[in-house]
């Protein structure tokens, strides 16, 4: 019996049930890779996440009940480790981008961006790299391939939460070919003050001009009044707009996505609350000019 979908899950050797969460799907030369995390729950470790990646073949027009899975791997031990994105670098060579609580015991350390490599069988090659500050929790949200520029490579975007509880955007630029040494990290920065950002709500987009748009939630005023904050960064992750643009007003508004049209105009998608604090949430599409002003 063939079907159009299949559930994929893991059960460890002791039969403990797990919960899986998917973060991304990547098209590769001969199929697809899904990246995310899986939980491990038992009496000794409570809800620790391990990174997880699944490789599918490309014959998804008909999915057998067993699932068209070439391999399924999870990586990690008693620490939180989450895979956000997998990129195919070459034949039987993949980079995994995510974040990890790298210090034992679990949940007593600090989170950092985490990059490691996989072989063709999905097993880690024991080459990895961490980026982040020991005084902050860095949680990776998105990965962009940097345009051709001074040192093409990868732009990692996410949030860093400080000991004060404040959360800011945190960007890392990596070289294009990773040797998994500290010299691979070209830039680590919090490029501009966008207020107290909500964890997991930050979006980046590469532009034709080789610059970057950064869209997030601005929670500067209070938890009851959250706006959209939009800014443009240079190819070296410094400010292109000196003052971020703020959209919203009545209540909590949420960042969705940002993209650039061929003519240079910018589209922003999000969710806005109308009618006050307990008002209705509505999808919003904003068309802006290249400087972020509402287009006529």
Image (cartoon, helix red, strand yellow):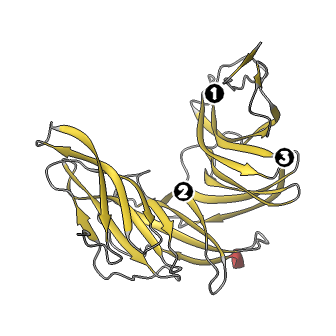
Residue 236, above or below 77: below
Toward the viewer: 224 or 41?
Answer: 224
Q: How far across and down, in percent of the image, does residue 231 sit?
A: 36, 72
Decide which of 198, 284 is in the foreground and name it.
284
Earlier in the chain: of badge 3 and badge 2, it is: 3
Residue drawn at 42 percent across, 67 percent down: 214
Callout 1 secondary element? loop
Q: CA distance from mark 2 to mark 1?
A: 27 Å
View extreme (top): residue: 1
Q: Secondary structure at mark 2?
A: strand
Indicate the quadrant containing the N terminus: top left, top right, bottom left or bottom right.
Answer: top right
Q: Residue at x 24, y 66 (%)?
A: 246
Question: Residue 19, how many percent across, how many down?
Answer: 60, 27
Specify few, some or many for label 3: CA neighbours under 10 Å numbering under 14, 14-19, or 20 or more.
some
Residue linked to disc 1: 44
- Label 3, label 2: how many angstroms apart (C-alpha)? 22 Å
Residue 145 falls in which quadrant of the image?
bottom right
Query: Is 69 on the left-hand or right-hand side of 270?
Result: right
- The local crowd at label 1, few if under 14, some if 14 to 19, many if 20 or more residues have their Cα within 10 Å, is few
The residue depicted at 25 percent of the width and 42 percent of the height is 282
Which callout, 2 or 1, points at the residue further toward the start of the chain?
1
Residue at the disc numbered 3? 123
x and y percentages locating residue 234 in the rendered image: 47, 82
Q: Are marks 3 and 2 in contact (CB under 8 Å)?
A: no
Task: Identify the residue position indicated by label 2 in the image.
Answer: 140
- Horizontal placement of 191 versus 92: left or right? left
């Amino acid at each position: 019996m063939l079907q159009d979908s299949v559930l994929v899950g893991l059960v460890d050797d002791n039969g403990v049930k797990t919960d899986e969460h998917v973060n991304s799907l990547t098209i590769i030369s001969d199929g697809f890779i899904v990246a995310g995390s899986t939980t491990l729950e038992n009496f000794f470790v409570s809800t620790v996440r391990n990174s997880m990646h699944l490789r599918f073949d490309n014959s998804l027009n008909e999915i057998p009940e067993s699932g068209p899975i070439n391999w399924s791997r999870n990586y990690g031990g008693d620490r939180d480790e989450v895979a956000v994105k997998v990129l195919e670098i070459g034949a039987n060579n993949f980079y995994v981008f995510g974040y990890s609580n790298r210090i034992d015991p679990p949940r007593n350390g600090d989170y950092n961006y985490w990059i490691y490599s996989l072989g063709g069988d999905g097993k880690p090659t024991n080459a990895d790299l961490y980026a982040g500050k020991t005084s902050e929790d860095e949680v990776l949200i998105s990965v962009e391939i940097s345009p051709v520029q001074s040192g093409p490579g990868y732009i990692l975007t996410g949030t860093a939460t400080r000991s004060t509880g404040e959360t800011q955007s945190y960007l890392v630029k990596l070289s294009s070919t990773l040797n998994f040494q500290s010299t691979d990290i070209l830039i680590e920065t919090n490029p501009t003050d966008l207020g107290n950002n909500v964890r997991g709500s930050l979006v980046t987009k590469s532009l034709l001009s080789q610059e970057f748009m950064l869209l997030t939630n601005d929670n500067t005023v209070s938890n009851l009044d959250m706006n959209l904050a939009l800014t443009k960064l240079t190819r070296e992750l410094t400010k292109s707009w000196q003052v971020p643009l703020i959209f919203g007003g009545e209540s909590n508004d949420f960042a969705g996505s940002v993209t650039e049209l061929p003519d240079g105009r910018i589209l922003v998608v999000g969710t806005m609350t109308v009618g006050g604090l307990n008002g209705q949430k509505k999808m919003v599409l904003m068309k802006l000019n290249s400087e972020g002003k509402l287009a006529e």
